[in-house]
Image (cartoon, grey):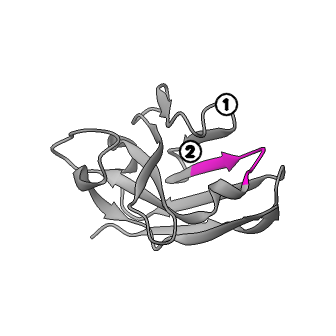
Amino acid sequence: QVQLVESGGGLVQAGGSLRRSCAASGRTFSSYVMGWFRQASGKERKFVAVISESGGSTFYADSVAGRFTISRDNARNTVYLQMNSLKPEDTAVYYCARLGENGGSWSDPNDYDYWGQGTQVTVSS
């Protein structure tokens, strides 16, 4: 059983920065694509960023490109999301997730099989 444990997040003023971390259990972390999603209150869960198994490839939602950076440390079984120039519209619960063994769409939450517990990020104006 894989567990994803998130840390970081919280309350920040607009223009500020936060870093999210997601630590995975198990010995096969480096074999999986990892992603970050977010869900604002009353809305569906949306794709934020994804990183390939080695970390050599990344892809971002248009709404965060140029402000957020996804990275990973396979030696530490951890994936990160650095969030800069935060805006009030970035307020949401943020989740890390592992893309399922069958692959699929990097941006479709239904193709991810394990999820972190989610942590609220609130950006005040």
- Disc 2 marks a residue whose amino acid type is Asp
Residue 39 magenta-drawn? no
User: Left of 53 or right of it: where is 103?
Assistant: left
Q: Nearer the viewer, residue 53 or 117?
A: 117
Q: Residue at x 59, y 50 (%)?
A: 80
Q: What is the magenta range?
A: 80-87
The answer to whether residue 82 is above or below residue 90 is: above
- Disc 1 marks a residue whose amino acid type is Gly
Give the labeled residue for mark 2. 73
Q: Residue at x 21, y 39 (%)?
A: 104
Give the labeled residue for mark 1. 66
What is the secondary structure assignment of the residue under circle 2?
Answer: strand
Q: Residue at x 78, y 44 (%)?
A: 85
Q: Earlier in the sequence, mark 1 or mark 2?
A: 1
Q: Nearer the viewer, residue 80 or 83?
A: 83
Q: Nearer the viewer, residue 69 or 28?
A: 69
Q: Residues within 10 Å of mark 2 (few under 14, many from 20)?
A: some
Residue extending furthest toward the top: 56
Q: Are marks 1 and 2 in contact (CB under 8 Å)?
A: no
Q: Position of residue 20 (x, y in %)?
A: 64, 58
User: Left of 17 or right of it: where is 48?
Assistant: left
Q: Position of residue 70 (x, y in %)?
A: 58, 41
User: Left of 64 or right of it: where is 114?
Assistant: left
Q: How far apart are labels 1 and 2 at the CA level?
A: 21 Å
Q: Residues within 10 Å of mark 1 (few under 14, many from 20)?
A: few
What is the secondary structure assignment of the residue under circle 1?
Answer: loop
Q: Position of residue 59 (x, y in %)?
A: 47, 31
